[in-house]
């Protein structure tokens, strides 16, 4: 024990008490009695100070601390400082909690705090209005018992898989959000976003009313699908007349160049319309792709034959297929993924360049990588590369006949198969596009 001034005070008071008892005992000619009386008085004084301290602890909010000196004064002073410090921190916590409640009340989004087993621990007023939660009555109840939509239950299950690392990091962000009808009104749409576990296994569930955004998105999809469908017939008629004009021997020489340019632009417009229709079909399909057996090796072989027979094939087209080259999915969508990735690689690779396609399967699932030695992509363009009609170099892309929709189609098709698209590129050195498919999409070996 460290010797402090208080220890010295206790020791000196005890010695003085014993010395005073000795003197009193000598006067009475009974030393033992004098020392005993002095020690009894010393003990009584300490008991009295202890009782005063105990009574003050019980009524410290109404009474001032006892005015005493010595060791008991030090103890009371220390307790007073601890009490004041506790009061300060308590007021600070209460103030922070009030500010937090005011902040969450003013938020346009609902906030629900979930325990590790998805039980509701707390929610703000907006969450109660959007989801129909009730104060006190719904505390401690599993949130899936109150929001019974099947997609929401699957959303919570996928979130648990993502937290355990059973889902790739590239796809974890997409799994953290789901949009479903409101449990109070089927016409409204609510977006649920789950934030990863924090604290003692708690998770934060954010709820937002996205009815207006969902309606606008639905209108956009309907418009694109209807417009693309309606444009097919006029473009077919225009292309037919242009073909007839190009084959007409009586066409003046001055019109041959413009007619050929119109034919090229018509073909490009038809490609854009077809790509928009395919993208609309993917968006309208919803859910995950079917589990049909797809022969990826056969699709790659046919695609390689077509590429090498094209007018401008690459100098080398290397294929590495690790068995089993099979996938459970939609054959048309898998073929679209392969065609768009390989076509893009060939399009932006010079004739002396090399394009390689690799397929392999490991414990994480199946993977398809298309690598080229083309012009590459600057790093600042990579995050937006899968947006519709986004082009790194608009002039060059249009000159090479690109639609600006290929990677958007690839992204949607890969997500329909529960996978993710990873893009790596170095400006001037080429690019690698990798599709990661989950292990459940790999058929068991025969």
Image: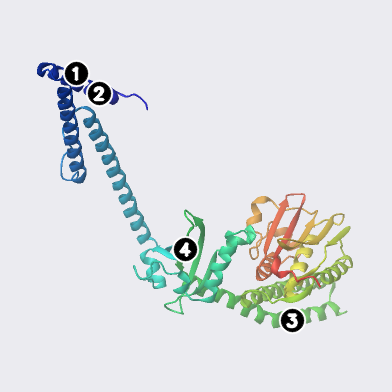
Of badges 2 and 3, the one in the foreground is: 2
Query: Which residue: 31% across, 44% down?
Result: 89
Q: Nearer the viewer, residue 146 or 303?
A: 146
| Quadrant in the picture for residue 293 | bottom right
Q: Which residue is mark 3?
A: 236
Residue 202: x and y, percent? 47, 58
Q: Which residue is mark 2?
A: 9
Mark identifier at residue 19 = 1
Of badges 1 and 4, the one in the foreground is: 1
- Could you tell me how far apart the alpha carbons at marks 4 and 3 are, in whole angstroms? 50 Å
Up/down of 132 relative to 23, above or below: below
| Quadrant in the picture for residue 163 | bottom right
Which residue is farthest front?
Answer: 29
| Quadrant in the picture for residue 346 | bottom right
Q: Nearer the viewer, residue 123 or 137?
A: 137
Relative to residue 55, is residue 114 drawn left or right?
right
Q: Are marks 1 and 2 in contact (CB under 8 Å)?
A: no
Q: Nearer the viewer, residue 419 or 391?
A: 419
Of badges 1 and 2, the one in the foreground is: 1
**Which element carries disc 3, helix, strand or loop?**
helix
Q: Name the quadrant of the C terminus.
A: bottom right
Please tell me which of labels 2 and 3 falls first in the chain. Answer: 2
Label 4 crowd (10 A; few <14 / some 14-19 / many >=20): many
Mark identifier at residue 205 = 4
Of badges 4 and 3, the one in the foreground is: 4
Query: Which residue: 53% across, 69% down?
Result: 178
Mark identifier at residue 314 = none
Residue 341: x and y, percent? 76, 64
- Could you tell me how far apart the alpha carbons at marks 4 and 2 are, in whole angstroms? 59 Å
């Amino acid at each position: 024990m460290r010797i402090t001034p208080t220890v010295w005070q206790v020791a000196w008071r005890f010695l003085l008490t014993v010395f005073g008892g000795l003197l009193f005992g000598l006067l009475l000619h009974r030393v033992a009695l004098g020392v005993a009386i002095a020690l009894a008085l010393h003990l009584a004084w300490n008991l009295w100070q202890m009782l005063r301290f105990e009574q003050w602890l019980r009524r410290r909010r109404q009474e001032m601390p006892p005015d005493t000196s010595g060791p008991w004064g030090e103890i009371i002073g220390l307790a007073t400082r601890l009490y004041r410090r506790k009061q300060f921190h308590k007021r600070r916590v209460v103030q922070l909690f009030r500010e937090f409640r005011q902040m969450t009340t003013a938020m346009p989004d609902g906030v629900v705090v979930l325990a590790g087993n998805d039980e509701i621990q707390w929610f703000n007023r907006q969450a109660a209005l959007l989801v129909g939660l009730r104060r006190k009555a719904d505390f401690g109840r599993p949130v899936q018992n109150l929001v019974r939509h099947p997609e929401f239950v699957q959303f919570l299950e996928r979130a648990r898989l993502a937290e355990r690392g059973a889902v790739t990091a590239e796809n974890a962000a997409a799994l953290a959000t789901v949009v479903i009808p409101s449990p109070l009104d089927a016409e409204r749409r609510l977006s649920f976003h789950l934030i990863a576990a924090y604290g003692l296994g708690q998770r934060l569930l954010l709820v937002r009313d996205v009815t207006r955004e969902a309606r606008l998105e639905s209108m956009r999809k309907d418009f694109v699908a209807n417009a693309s469908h309606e444009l097919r017939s006029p473009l077919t008629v225009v292309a037919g007349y242009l073909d007839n004009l190009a084959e007409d021997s009586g066409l003046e020489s001055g019109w041959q160049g413009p007619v050929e340019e119109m034919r090229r632009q018509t073909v490009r417009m038809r490609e854009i319309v077809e790509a928009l229709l395919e993208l609309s079909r993917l968006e309208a399909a919803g859910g995950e792709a079917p589990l049909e057996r797809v022969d990826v090796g056969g699709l790659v072989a046919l695609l390689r034959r077509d590429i090498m027979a094209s007018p401008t094939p690459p100098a080398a087209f290397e294929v590495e297929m690790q068995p089993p080259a099979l996938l459970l999915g939609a054959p048309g969508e898998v073929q679209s993924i392969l065609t768009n990735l390989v076509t893009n690689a060939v399009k932006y690779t010079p004739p002396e360049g090399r394009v390689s396609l690799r397929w392999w399967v490991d414990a994480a699932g199946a993977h398809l990588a298309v690598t080229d030695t083309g012009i590459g992509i600057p790093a600042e363009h990579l995050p937006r590369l899968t947006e519709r009609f986004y082009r790194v170099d608009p002039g060059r892309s249009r000159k090479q006949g690109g639609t600006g929709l290929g990677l958007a189609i690839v992204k949607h098709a890969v997500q329909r198969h529960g996978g993710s698209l990873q893009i790596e590129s170095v400006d001037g050195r080429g690019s690698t596009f990798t599709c990661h498919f989950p292990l459940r999409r790999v058929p068991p070996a025969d």
